[in-house]
Image (cartoon, coloured by chain):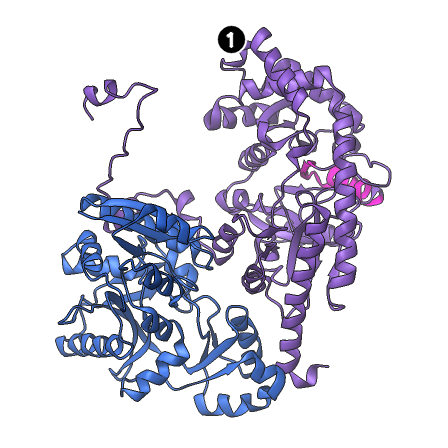
Amino acid sequence: MSRVAVLRGGPSLEREVSLRSGTNVELALGRLGHEVIPLDADAHMVRALREARPEVVFVALHGRGGEDGTVQEILEILKIPYTGSGVLASERAMDKVVSKALFRGADIPTPHGYAFSKEAFSKMGAADALPEIQQSLGLPLCVKPARQGSALGISIVREPGDLGGAILNAMGFDDRVLMERFVPGRELAVSVVMANDPWALPLIEAVPLGHDFYDFEARYTPGETELRAPRDLDEATAQDAAAVSIAAARTLECRGIARVDLILDDEGRLWVLEVNTIPGMTDTSLLPKAAEVAGIGFDRVVADMLELAALDT
Amino acid sequence: MSTSDVTDNPGTGAPVPPQTPLVGPADAARYESRFSALASGTTSSVMRDLMAITEKADIISLAGGLPDTETFPREIYDEIVGQIGTDFLASSLQYGPTDGMGELREQIAKVMADEGARVRVDDIMITTGGQQAIDLSIRTFVDRGDTVLAEGPTYPGAAPCFTAYGADVTHVPMDDDGMREDLFEEAYERLAAEGRPPKILYTVPNFQNPAGVTMSLERRERLMEFAHRVGLLIIEDNPYGQIRFEGDPLPTLYELDDGAGWVVYLGTFSKILVPGMRVGWAVSPPQVLRKMNLGKQAADLCSSTYNQRFVAEYLKRYDYREHVARVCELYRGRRDAMLDALAARFPAEATWTRPRGGLFVWATLPDFIDTTALQAKALERQVAFVPGEGAFLDGRGRNSMRLNFSSVPEAVITEGIGRLGEVIGEVIALHEALNPGSR
C-alpha cells in the first residue's frame, strides 16, 4: 500500500475529461488499498505535492501541460516517481508531427503528411503551397492541430475549398497544423503495457454512430460510439496490430501503459496515427474497455500503471 | 453499513470515510441500457467541456450571466434573517403551498404593477427561480415534435428544456428592435401551412439574453395583434425588464394582452434582488396554472419556504427599486466600459449590440471564425465568453459570442475585451494569410 497522489483536472481543454479519468483512477486505487490524495494540477500544484509527500504520482491529466512533458519535468525535479511516459517521450507523443517523423524513421507505417506553423502562413506565404499539398495528399484529407488530444480541432476536408477553413479551425488549438492523407478504414486502438517485456491488451474498435469520425462528442457521450472487440479480424491482423503498436510506443520510448491509435484500411494494411501516453480512463474510453475484454479488469490496469511508475533519472 | 458505524460517529465527530464504490468503468453499460430517452438525449459537447475551464479562478470570465451579489447590504441581510428567526421560525422551516406563499404573491403583483401590468394574485405561481418557470411552461405545452418559435439567438438556458421535451425550434432573427416581426409572421405562416403550426412562441422582449436587444413598442403591438388573430400562445420571459440604464420602460406583452389569456408571463427576483434565493414566478390563466401546479408538485412540491419568506420580508421592509437603482448604476458603468473597450479593441470586421439594459452584449465576427475554436485560443490568454452556438438549436451562431458585463469590474472588462480583440485579430490575419486573394 502506498500514498498515491492523483493529478487530474488542470488547465487544459481536456479538463473535464481528465476529471472523469481521475475519478475512475481514484476509486480503483482505493479498492486496491492505497491511500489516495486527489490533486488538481493548478497554480498550487508544486506546493500541494510538497505538502502531501506522496510516494508516487498517478498522472491522470490529458492534453497540454499534463501529457506533453511539462508535469513530468516538474515531477522529475521533485523526484517523485510518476505513472506513464517520461519527459521526452511525452513531448514526442504529444506532437503528431514529431511522432510521425519518428515513425517514418523506424519504418512504422503512418499516413503521409505535411505540417505548417502559423508563421509559415503569416510570414512566408505558405498558403500558396496549399494546392501542391492537396495534390500530393489527395482528397479527402485530414487536418489536425499538431499538439491536442481528444480529436479537438480535427476536421476531414472533402471539398477543395474547405482546406483553409479547416486549417484556421485547427490553428484554434495549436500554432502548428498537420495535414495528413486520409486513410479510410476501421478505427482501432491497442493499449500496450511497456514493461521489460512489452505486451498488448486486446485491440478495440471504435465505431462512431452517426458521426463522421471518432470525434470529441462521439468519444465522451455514452451511446454515440460502440467500442467492441472485433470478432471478424483474423489472428494474424491482431498480432500485427499488437506488434506495430509496441514498435510505435518503443520508438517514442514510452513507459507505463500507452494507447496506440491505428487505422485498418480496406486492403488490410495497418497505419499508426498516434500514440497517447496518458490514455483516457473515462467510462467511455478505450483502455478500460480493453481491460474488460482482456478479462483482467480496470483495477488491474491501474495497478500495472502504478507498478511501472518511475523517474527518467 | 451496520448501525454501530452510525452511532460511533456522532454529528460532531470525525468525518466518516466514504465507502469506496465497487462500480468501475466496465459497469457504465449497466446504467446506459437503463437511461430514459430523456436522459440519453443530453449529449457531451466540446462547448460544455470548455466552459468547465472558465470557472477557474485566474480566468477573466465574460462568460457568466451573474448578477453582482456584492451589492446586497450586509445589515439588511442580518436584519431579515434575525426577523425570520424571531417571527417565522417554524413556518419558514415547514412545507408550503405549491403555488407559493400568499403574502409573497401579493407582493409580486405589486412588483408587476411597477412594470405596468395588473395581475390577479391567484394567477401567480411562485417557482424555484425563473428557470423552473421556463421548464414548467415548456413541459406544460410541448410534446415531442411540436414546433416552437424562439428568437435567434435564444436564451441558452432554455435550450436544454427545448431539447429535453423534444421541441422542434425555429429561430426568428433579430435586429436592434428585437425579433423581426415580418420574419416571425413568415415563419409562423410557413409552419402553419405545413400543417404544424407553432405551439408557442418563447420570447425575452427586454434586454434579451443573449442578444441584449429590446423589442420595440411597435413590434410588441404588432406581435400581440398577430397572436390574437391566429391564436398563438406566448411565453414572455422577463428577467431583465427593470434592469434598464436608459430610455423609457415599455409595456410587457402580458400588459398588451390585456387579460385575453394568450401570454404566460415569467418573472424572477434573480436580477432585481439576488439569484441565490431562487425565487421566480409564473403568471397565467387558471386553466394553465393548474397544469403547471401539477408539474411543480412532481418537481419539488414547493419552492423553499425559507427563501420565499426572506424575499417577502425584504419587500415588506425595503423598496426593492432602490436596490435595482444601485444595481443599474453599477451595470451601466460596466456596460459603458465594455462598449468603449469593444470600440477600441475589437477589429473593424466585428459588430455588436448596444444594450440599453440587462447583462449582455452579443458580438458577431466574420463568418469564417468559429467561436468555439476561438474560445480555446482565448482560454490560453485567460479570458472566456459564451460561444454563440449554445444560443441556437439548429447549429447557427458559430461566429457569434455572448459577453457578460454585469459581474466583472470595469478595469477587468477592459483587459478582457482587449485580450479577446487580440486573439480575434490574429485569427483574421491568419485567415487573410490563408486566403491571399480575400483582401
Residue nearer the viewer, A269 or B41: A269
Q: Position of residue B207 (x, y in %)?
A: 74, 43
**Residue A195 lies in the magenta-colored region:** no
Q: Residue at x 73, y 81 (%)?
A: B439
Q: Is residue A220 left or right of residue A168?
A: left
Q: Residue at x 64, y 82 (%)?
A: B433
Q: Amino acid at mark 1?
A: Ala
Task: Identify the chain of the residue marked 1, using the numbered disc in the image.
Answer: B
Q: Is residue A206 left or right of residue B429?
A: left
The residue beneath circle 1 is: B90
Q: Does dot 1 land on a helix, a strand or a loop? A: helix
Q: Position of residue B282 (x, y in %)?
A: 63, 28
Chain part drawn in magenta = B218-239
Q: Position of residue B240 (x, y in %)?
A: 71, 37
Q: In what quadrant of the picture does the C terminus of chain A appear?
A: bottom left
Chain A takes which shade in the image?
blue
Residue nearer the viewer, A207 or A105: A105
Q: Position of residue A262 (x, y in %)?
A: 29, 75
Q: Quadrant of residue B258?
A: top right
Q: Residue furthest top?
A: B87
